[in-house]
Amino acid sequence: MFRQMMIAALLSGATAAPALADMIVVAASGPASLQPGDRIAEGSSLKLPDGAKLTVLFQSGEMKRIDGPFDGKLDAAPPVERPFSGWDAVRKFLGAGGQTSEVLGASRKTDSSLPDQPGIWLVSIDSSGERCTRKDELTFWRRDAAEALTVTLRNEAGKASDLNWPAGSHTFTAPATFPVTDGALALSAGSALRKFGLKVLPQDLEDAYPGAVLGWLLDSGCTRQASALISRVHEGEPLE
């Protein structure tokens, strides 16, 4: 019914590029008929019952939340000549274009007594891997804050050692004197050693639309932080 009004027929294999006016659903909650990855054509009618909520992404990079009850046509998408860099990465992440995505929700906690990552720009130390940060602050995050830890940081540009991560604190910010650069970063915290591939947000994206930042996070391999960005936009929270 409702889905039949959506241009969401996704062909497996070689899918033609969507029209530049199309939008894509990046988050849905409540009794919403659409799901992440579904495409919506400009001018389509949308009906959301009370309690339903959608967040859609335009190819300009703008993201918009739509709260139910809603019954009408969506506003016209901002005109663009081409999608923002990272648009295809977002579609793949969401399972669009005939692909299946299992990364949504993959960063959820396995122990319900421990908190989820609360911010986009927190570098989780639960595992090694790709991480993204802003230039002005490098902040680490851990789920279990029961113990005090002695921290050492090392990259090609410098080293900081004998740093104290107090018990009870889930976050730890690197000293302002520690150089934050793209590339390999090693963190020793207590008996644990983590190796990260760190990517620093480019200056031209600092004031960009959330979707452009989302695409960059995904292109950089920072899927957990991409999930955090989507969640914060969907919940109307600051992009921190």
Image (cartoon, rainbow, N blue to C red):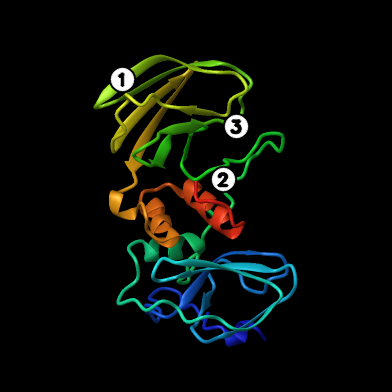
Query: Outermost residue toward the left?
Result: 157
Q: Residue 114's spot in the image, x, y percent?
A: 67, 34
Q: Earlier in the sequence, mark 1 or mark 3?
A: 3
* Point 42% across, 80% down: residue: 21
Can see residue 170? yes
Can see residue 125? no
Quadrant placement of the N terminus: bottom right
Q: Residue 32's spot in the image, x, y percent?
A: 68, 71
Q: Earlier in the sequence, mark 2 or mark 3?
A: 2
Of helix, strand and loop, which one carries label 3?
loop
* Amino acid type of the residue tagged 1 in the rendering: Lys
Residue 16: which quarter of the image?
A: bottom left
Residue wearing tag 2: 107
Of helix, strand and loop, which one carries label 1?
strand
Residue wearing tag 1: 159
* Amino acid type of the residue tagged 2 in the rendering: Ser
* Point 56% across, 18% down: residue: 166
Q: Residue 185's spot in the image, x, y percent?
A: 34, 30
Residue wearing tag 3: 143
Tag 1 and tag 3, C-beta contact below 8 Å: no
Q: Residue 180's spot in the image, x, y percent?
A: 31, 33
Q: Residues within 10 Å of mark 1 (few under 14, many from 20)?
A: some
